[in-house]
Structures are given as C-alpha cells and as structure tokens.
Amino acid sequence: MRTTLGTRGFAWGFIGAASAIFLFGTILQNWLVTLLGPFVVAAGFVIAAYVSSAQHAERDFFEGFARRHRFTYLDRLALLETTPLLGAGQSRSCTHYMEGLLTQALPGTSCGLAWFTYETSDENSDRRGRTIETRAPHHFTVCVVDIESAMRAFPGIFLIRRRSLFRVLDGDQWLDVERLREVELESSSFQERYELFVSKSQEQNQLLRLFRPSFLVWMSEHPLEAYFEFAAGTLVVYLHQRESDSTQLDYLLEVTAFIAQSLVEQAAGQKSASVPPVQ
C-alpha cells in the first residue's frame, strides 16, 4: 500500500484529477464541488491503491508458495472439464495455478493447485414482468491430479461433505447423486464428516480395499477436512473456499498425495504402503 501510494504515476494522477475537479467547480461557481471534490478524488485514489495492493500481495503470496515447492506458476488457466466439479455451472475460471511434482512416492505424477470458481445463473421476473438474471459464484481451492492407471478399477468415486436435513440447500450441489450409489462405511467418525457416492458400476470389494480402516482413520483425523472426486482418470481434491494460508495449502497437498497414492496402489493390486502420520 505504501509503495503504491508513493509512486510517481499515482501522485501525478491524483494531482491531475484533483485539479480538474477544482477547476470544474470554479467554472460552475459551485463551491461545494470546488472544496469537497479533491477530498472525494483522494478517497477514490486510496481505495484504488488498496485494491491494487491487495491484488499484488495475493499474487506475491502464490508465486512465493510455488517457488518454495518448486512449482511453476500461471496467473490463469482453463481446466479440462473431466469431473463434475470442473464442469459445473454456466461458466468457470481458474486462477493462481501452480503445477509440480505431487510426491516423491509417485515419480512423474504432477498436480495442479489453484483457486477454482464456477458460476450459476438464475432468471427471475420483477414486478413489471421483466426478466432479471442473477449470477452466483461458488469458490473452491482444488488440487488436480491425472491418474489414468486407476480409471478401470475406479470408474467414479465422490466423497462429499455431510449434508444436513436440508439436503437440497447444501452439500455439493453440482453432483447428480441420483445417478450414483451411496455407500455407508463402518466408521462413525468418517460418516460424521463425509458422504460417499460411487458409480453404479463400481466393484464393491475393490472399493472396500481402497477405503480400508487405516484410510478411514487417516481421513477422519486429519486436521484438514478435504473432499474429493475421481472420474475419467482425474482426481480433484477440494476445499469449499479460496484458501490463502500456506499451512492449509500444504495440508491440501498432503491429503492429495495420500489419496492419489492409495488409488494407484489399489488399482495395481499392491499392498498399501505405510500410512503417513496425521499432522
């Protein structure tokens, strides 16, 4: 903020705008405009500087996070609509995209960490019968991984947040659960956090090998309550907000690595590796 306010362009812009307002008020002989105009201009410039500074600070944070993890950084990117979440809404955007190696345990497997937003639109009529379109943004933080090797073993897995009695008003509304099969697992702590839906073609024993007791305990006790969907060979682990805390982003990468490694191992019929401790 201090840097932005101290730039030469900002100073000359303010002087020019304030002088123009002062001159305009003098010509009109409107002393209210003449006296208060420069203060209004100053307030507008301060607000503009604050918005610009916040945007620069936000970008600096994500660029620094990407460097720390040896990720590449892109300000914007269009994600392929391979899962229900990534194809939700009428429009979608992805910002602060960071890509790099997910974990040393999966050589060659990269992930994309980013802010993701989809928008829904509704049309309503006002009192005069005119159509008014309202748009609502839905913000997420996502970590996307391509795991084609697990496509055949797991045609579709969707772990969503536990819904309340008002099932229509909350939950992951982009997901068409009517076309899926709900699965209940023998873990009360897990069931308190999550609901699990799978493709109707999902083989049950294969699914239970993935959601083994150690998997359920790890997901239930981890400090980050993250959700995921796996479809068409794409894993998306997500949070229901734009996350800008480095610790939480590290947790998201950790959860993604754990789920991705479990999918790869179970799809290959391997014995699960040792479960990392919950942080």
Image (spheres, rainbow, N blue to C red):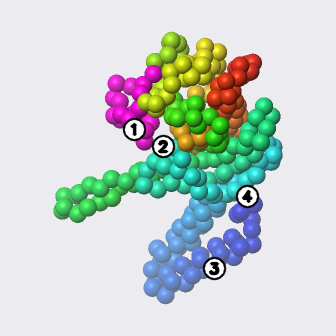
Q: Position of residue 221 (x, y in %)?
A: 62, 18
Q: Does 232 appear above or below 160?
A: below
Q: Which residues are magenta?
A: 164-183
Q: Is residue 182 magenta?
A: yes
Q: Nearer the viewer, mark 2 or mark 3?
A: 2
Task: Identify the mark nearer the N-term, 4 or 3.
Answer: 4
| Category of crowding for the residue at label 2, using alpha-carbon neighbours closer than 10 angstroms: few (below 14), some (14–19), many (at least 20) | some
Residue name at image x 23 percent, y 63 percent: 130
* Residue holding disc 3: 16
Residue 176's disc is 1
Name the image quarter holding residue 125.
bottom left
Q: Amino acid at mark 3?
A: Gly
Q: Which mark is residue 2?
A: 4
Prevailing SS of the magenta stretch: loop
Q: Which mark lies nearer to you, 1 or 3? A: 1
Considering the image in quadrants, where does the N terminus appear? bottom right
Residue type, label 2: Pro
Foreground of the two, 220 or 51: 220
Mark 4 neighbour class, 10 Å CA radius: few under 14, some 14 to 19, many 20 or more: few
Q: Secondary structure at mark 1?
A: loop
